[in-house]
Structure formats: C-alpha cells, structure tokens
Amino acid sequence: MDLVEFENVSMRYGEEGPMAIENVTLSVRENEFVAVVGPSGCGKSTLMKLVTGLAPPSEGYVYLDGKQVSGPQKGVGMAFQASNLLPWRTTLDNILLPMEIVQEYRHRFRAEKAKFQEQGRALLARVGLAGCEDKFPWELSGGMQQRASICRALIHKPALLMLDEPFAALDAFTREELWCMVRDLWQEDPFTVVLVTHDLREAVFLADTVYVMSKGPGRIEARKEVNLPRPRDLAVTYTDEFAELVFELRDHIGRIREDTQ
Ligand SMILES: Nc1ncnc2c1ncn2[C@@H]1O[C@H](COP(=O)(O)OP(=O)(O)OP(=O)(O)O)[C@@H](O)[C@H]1O
C-alpha cells in the first residue's frame, strides 16, 4: 500500500512567483525508504512542506495514508540539518517534547509520564545515547545532537519520517555512523522514510528508491531502484555495483545542471 502519493503536484510561492515544483507524481510504499536528490533549489524542501501539510499545492493532490493532505500532519516525524534541540532542556526532555506539545498526545503523556520517559530512555539507548539522558544539548557532540533529534522525530512512532539533510553538517566519519544508526532503527522496527539529501552515496546506501529532481521548476527526472541486498554494511559502498549506481545518479544530475546553466 502507498503511504504517500503525489498526483501531478505543482507549487508556486505566492500568486505570481515562479513554479517551485511542477507536475510531480510519485508514490512511497509503506515502510519504503525513499531518497530525493537534486541540485540546490530544485524543490526538495518544498516536497517536505507539501507532505507535512505546511503548505498546500497550487495544483494537483497530495495524499498521506489515503487521505488528502489539507493541514499539518501529526503522524509525521521530522528532522533537519540543524538539530534544533532546546538548550535549557535535557536530552530526555528534548526528545519527549512532541509528547508534551502535540495536543493529541498531551493527555496520555501527563497520565503515563513514567512510561513515556522509559520509552524515551530505551530509544536513546538504541541510538547509542544511554547515559546522556540528563545531559544538556551543549554537552553533546554534533553527531550526538543529531541522534537525539532523530529520536525526537520518532518518539511518537510516526508512520512517516521526513529527513531534510540531517547529516549534511557532520564530518564524513560521523555521517557514516549516523547512516548506520538510521539503517538499524529502520530495519529493527520499520517505518516509511523520505530522505532529502545532496549526498548520492548516502541516498544509495540507505534507500530502496532514489528520485532525482531537476530545478527551475523542480521536476522528477529519474527514479532509480537500489537493489543492493540488505542488511547493507558500509563495505557495500566500496563495491563496483555501488559505484555504478552513484555514477548513474551523478550523470543524471550533471546533465540537469548543464541544461539549467
Ligand atoms: N518561502 C518561499 N518563498 C518564495 N520562494 C521560495 C520559498 N521557499 C522556496 N522558494 C523557492 O522555491 C524553489 C525551491 O526551493 P526549495 O527550498 O524547496 O529547494 P531545495 O531543493 O530544498 O533547496 P536546497 O537544496 O538549497 O535546500 C527555489 O527556487 C526557492 O527559491
């Protein structure tokens, strides 16, 4: 079953502005890991706003779990390039924030606080942050902050996790560690993921399907299935098969850049 569907979606900001994305049709199956790659400004973040209901399409339809998206969606977890943890809250309190502020969960959270705190601790342990529950964000490294930010996005067990370049600001080694963390979380207890990234290796390592977007306006130029066997180890990134997939995507993007420059 498809969890996310875009049907001929176009979007412009303002009445007169240029099209940010045009005629986008795509679908994401339940528990599929999708990556969207493309040059800067091609509309990747706009796709995220449309799925989460933060902006309506100018034309076409966006469906989430079979229902047309017409406002902010509760069942979506989001993480961004900046972890945006609140500096005055501990790591555990930061990751429990959605339970406190989203009206839907607030009552249950107040009634069963100890249970949710336990779930928060367990989630932190799964991402290697056991012992960091009472630390403040400034006591954590950048990679640890991003781990916590992904926990915060998953604490309410969303059907869909939207990741907008969550590893872009990290060094190469930390980035690869976090790829493995997301891979493990997803494999242990599957959910649907849409990952927006500039990093082709990241897209091929993590995703089942990669969409390549062009810019001005953003269109889906290519869809590539990644049939590398799972579970994938980092060693796969040094194989010819992996390099060929990355090269093919790079070639698409190179051609798009030539056409739009
Ligand atoms: N709030 C806004 N108002 C007007 N135009 C916008 C707004 N947000 C985005 N745009 C325009 O829409 C187009 C797509 O932007 P978007 O941020 O979705 O691209 P992106 O692929 O996420 O970019 P990047 O990779 O640089 O983050 C761009 O031309 C951008 O200038």
Image (tube, rainbow, N blue to C red):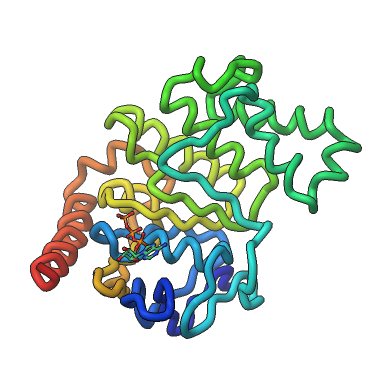
Quarter of image, res 166: top left
Q: Kindly identify the residue that appears in the image at 38 percent across and 58 percent down.
A: 35
Q: Nearer the viewer, residue 167 or 249?
A: 167
The quarter of the picture where the N terminus appears is bottom right
Q: Nearest the camera: 29 or 94?
A: 94
Relative to 58, say whether 150 is above or below. Answer: above
Q: How many marks?
A: 0
User: Residue 242, percent across and down?
Assistant: 23, 51
Q: Residue 184: where, in percent of width, then height? A: 50, 39
Q: Quadrant of residue 38?
A: bottom left
Location of residue 246 in the rendering, given as x and y in whole percent from the top left corner: 21, 54
Q: Residue at x 29, y 29 (%)?
A: 171
Q: Where does residue 229 sit, x and y in percent of width and height?
A: 37, 52
Residue visible at 53% across and 22% down in the picture:
137
Nearer to the camera, 63 or 176: 63
- Quadrant of the image containing the C terminus: bottom left
Seen at 53% across and 46% down, the residue is 186
In the rendered view, would you say 25 is above or below 165? below
| In this picture, residue 100 sits left or right of residue 108 | left
For the question of whether residue 25 can be seen, the reply is no
**Which residue ends up furthest to the right in the rendered image?**
111
The answer to whether residue 153 shows anywhere in this view is: yes
Ligand 1 is in which quadrant of the figure? bottom left
